[in-house]
Amino acid sequence: MVQYQQTSVDRSFAALSDATRRGVVEQLGRGDASISELAGKFGMTLTGMKKHVGVLEQAGLVITVKAGRVRTCRLGSSGLEAEAAWIESYRRLWAARFGALDQIVEELKHEEQTNGRKTSP
Amino acid sequence: MDERRAPEAAGTRQTTTERRGDRELVVTRSFDGPARLVFLAWSRPELLRRWWVPESFPVKLLSCEADVRTGGTYRLEFGVPGRDEPLAFFGRYIEVVPPTRIVWSNDEDGGGGPVTTVTFEERDGWTHIVLTDRYPSGAALEEAIASGSVSGYAEQFEALEALLGTLGE
């Protein structure tokens, strides 16, 4: 079941906090790939890549299907969750900046009050 | 694009972000102060550097030059943990109209970066800002999303992630 909730976004965000996993999502955006193909592409062991894919799978970003001996990976939910996570992280970046900007605006207001509304341009 | 939502947002400090259409990202926020002061904080480099990279951020701003006039340029250089070379962001102020509007280019990616527009609107002593990143194409925005970078700020962003994860915003 797909849940578009905060918790799901959080999980996507955590899953995408790793550069390799972001690369895997980007790669799968171009086409499906097996775990061994991904391992080769990113210069990793099969075990290492399995771990990364597992994290992405838990976050709902990637779906894997086993056919015979090959496990094929593709993007889950049309990458929508990846986009949601990205936009959320973008929001956090600006929210952190704007918190600091609040403080500067307060300082400027205080300055204006003390100097009788004379802040030169 | 909901203009009517703005009055409700005034008076709160909530930051919102949304994708608009295939090539724009929009950030909104309200500040408790008049537009001339909020604009001042964006247009004076000595103020800009204090909030663009707050002290709590793990990246350090090495230099910040900004000639905030139409046709002026800016250049910010960052020190990033684990990198020897400073990371530079630069561009040009395409339009500056105090205290209502600033438009600048993001040129570090050689033309593939967005054009950023910030508008400042004062209401009841609060200033509502709308920041829009407009990418040259839908594909350019898709690429930015797929690479996980934020307006070309990939390395900065990676360094920020650990910190932001703990802020609980």
Image: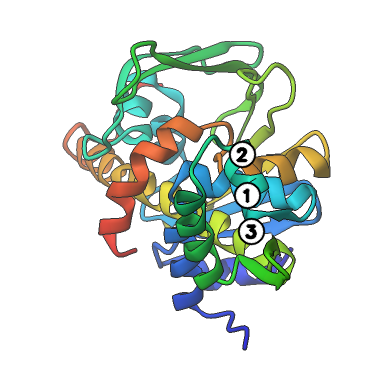
For label 3, the crowd category at 10 Å Cα-Cα, with few meaning under 14, some 14 to 19 and many 20 or more, is: some
Residue type indicated by callout 3: Glu
Q: Nearer the viewer, mark 3 or mark 2?
A: 2
Determine if residue B130 is in view. Answer: yes
Check if mark 2's residue and mark 1's residue have beta carbons within 8 Å. Answer: yes
Question: Is A11 displayed left or right of B92 in the figure?
Answer: left
- Residue B39 horizontal/vertical position (percent): 46, 35
Question: Is A58 displayed left or right of A34 in the figure?
Answer: left
Residue type indicated by callout 1: Ser
Q: Chain of mark 1?
A: A
Please tell me whether residue B66 is drawn above or below residue A48 in the rendered image. above
Which callout, 3 or 2, points at the residue further toward the start of the chain?
A: 2
Q: Residue at x 70, y 71 (%)?
A: A65
| Secondary element at tag 1 | helix
Please tell me whether residue B77 is drawn above or below residue A80 in the rendered image. above
Co-location on one chain, circles 1 and 3: yes
Q: Quadrant of the N terminus of chain B?
A: bottom right
Please tell me whether residue B24 is drawn above or below residue B110 in the rendered image. below
Quarter of the image where one finds residue A77: bottom right
Which callout, 1 or 3, points at the residue further toward the start of the chain?
A: 1
- Residue A118 horizontal/vertical position (percent): 30, 28
Residue type indicated by callout 2: Gly
For label 2, the crowd category at 10 Å Cα-Cα, with few meaning under 14, some 14 to 19 and many 20 or more, is: few
Q: What is the distance, in whole Å, between disc 3 and disc 2 at their CAs?
A: 26 Å
Q: Nearer the viewer, mark 1 or mark 3?
A: 1
Q: Which residue is mark 1?
A: A36
Q: Which residue is mark 3?
A: A83
Check if mark 1's residue and mark 3's residue have beta carbons within 8 Å. Answer: no
- Residue A68 horizontal/vertical position (percent): 73, 70
Determine if residue B120 is in view. Answer: no
Disc number placed over residue A40 in the picture, else none: 2
Q: Chain of mark 2?
A: A
